[in-house]
Image (cartoon, helix red, strand yellow):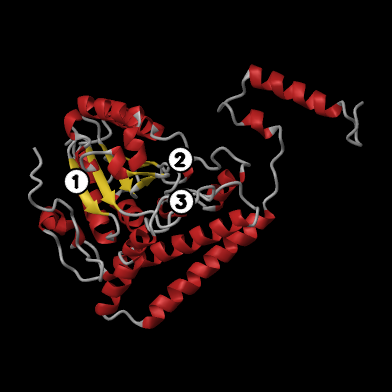
Amino acid sequence: MVDDSQDPMVQLLGPDGTFAPSAAAEEFLPYFERLTEADWRKFYKDMVTVRRFDTEATNLQRQGQLGLWVPSHGQEGAQVGSAYGARTQDHVFPAYREHAIAMIRGVDLLNLIKVMKGITHGGFDFRESNNFHIYTLVIGSQALHATGYAMGIKFDGAYATGNPETDQAVIVYFGDGATSQGDVSEAFVFAASQQTPQVFFVQNNHWAISVPVSVQARVPLYRRGEGFGVPGTQVDGNDVFASYAVTAKLMDDARAGKGPALVEAVTYRIQAHTTSDDATKYRSESDLEEWIAKDPISRLEAFLKDKGTDSSFFAEVHESAADFAADIRNRTLSVTNPDIFETFDKVYSHPHPAMAEQKAWLQAYEASFGDEGGAA
């Protein structure tokens, strides 16, 4: 049983940027101590950059360039920290809000724009994106995909060899709402029974669209795995250092053959669930303001300033982030619709007679209208 008499949350940075490890953080401190000042600055730059990108993407949707956008504002600490806790050879299975992780793994974020513009089903090959798999919009299904892949790693003997440069593990991301899906429970069953090398990373942003987590779960989400045999850890998701340290240790444990683990990163969705949602209908302004005060970027900035980081660094980061967003905007406006016939070319990895037949039919049908678009 979990002892609830003490705060179980792992935290290294307080909301004011003070370095004050919680009691639960002790076993993870060696991982924080690996970090250099250059790492701190890299974390900060990535969080600022992806937030600026996220804002630009939201604006593009509002201006009619995208059908939908899924904001990540407020969740940068959980994402950036955990992204660096994985190794290049590890496989990452996202939901649809993991923009920072995609960027860190080397995905051109224009590919995410194309998904939300409705002109691609994925847009990139995970083998060319440091094993970052495509976004999954079917809630919770990626937990099964990840568990199946982790079972494959186990059966191939690609973990627990003692070589940290080649041993593999899997990390899968989903939100608090997905923990209510049967797919996630089924994934816990197989992960525990097979002792797969994987980490389940739940970003608890407190809302499954308009349903609060207090309605979804009567116990903290990090305890959801206990009955299946998957141990859990709760981390301050707005603390990038804690998110890194917890993920790095649990991924090391997974690669070493110690079985699956569950992380609950407690964070908050500052913007709406998607651009089709109106969060003012169900959230209070006071609740929002409370979480804005816990912002992951602000707290790391306060920490860096306390360590003597020059103001020019922050100015350069924000300028670079603005340039990054401007480039995304320019390239988005230059995107053209793909040839409709490409639909048939991307269903299977190899030529397929049924797809060839359907493609030929559509080509003939289109040609029947003639050059001027009228019926032949």
**In the visual, does 43 lie left or right of 14?**
right
| Residue 68 appearing in the image | yes
Which x, y percent locates residue 4? 10, 46
Residue pointed to by mark 2: 127
The CA distance from mark 2 to mark 3 is 42 Å
Tell me which amino acid carries mark 1: Thr
The CA distance from mark 1 to mark 3 is 32 Å
Residue 306, compared with residue 250, is above or below; it is: below
Residue pointed to by mark 3: 281
The CA distance from mark 1 to mark 2 is 30 Å
Does dot 3 land on a helix, a strand or a loop?
helix
Residue at 62% from the left image edge and 23% from the top image edge: 351
Tell me which amino acid carries mark 2: Arg
Mark linked to residue 233: 1
* Most foreground residue, 274 or 35: 274
Residue at 46% from the left image edge and 37% from the top image edge: 136
Which x, y percent locates residue 327? 59, 63
Residue at 17% from the left image edge and 34% from the top image edge: 226
**Label located before the other in sequence (2 or 3):** 2
* Most foreground residue, 190 or 249: 190
Tell me which amino acid carries mark 3: Lys
**Label located before the other in sequence (1 or 3):** 1
**Label located before the other in sequence (1 or 2):** 2
Residue 313, compared with residue 253, is above or below; it is: below
**In the visual, does 336 lie left or right of 222?**
right
Does dot 2 land on a helix, a strand or a loop?
helix
Q: Are marks 1 and 2 in contact (CB under 8 Å)?
A: no
| Residue 163 appearing in the image | no
Other residues around mark 1 within 10 Å, as few (<14) / some (14–19) / many (≥20) = many
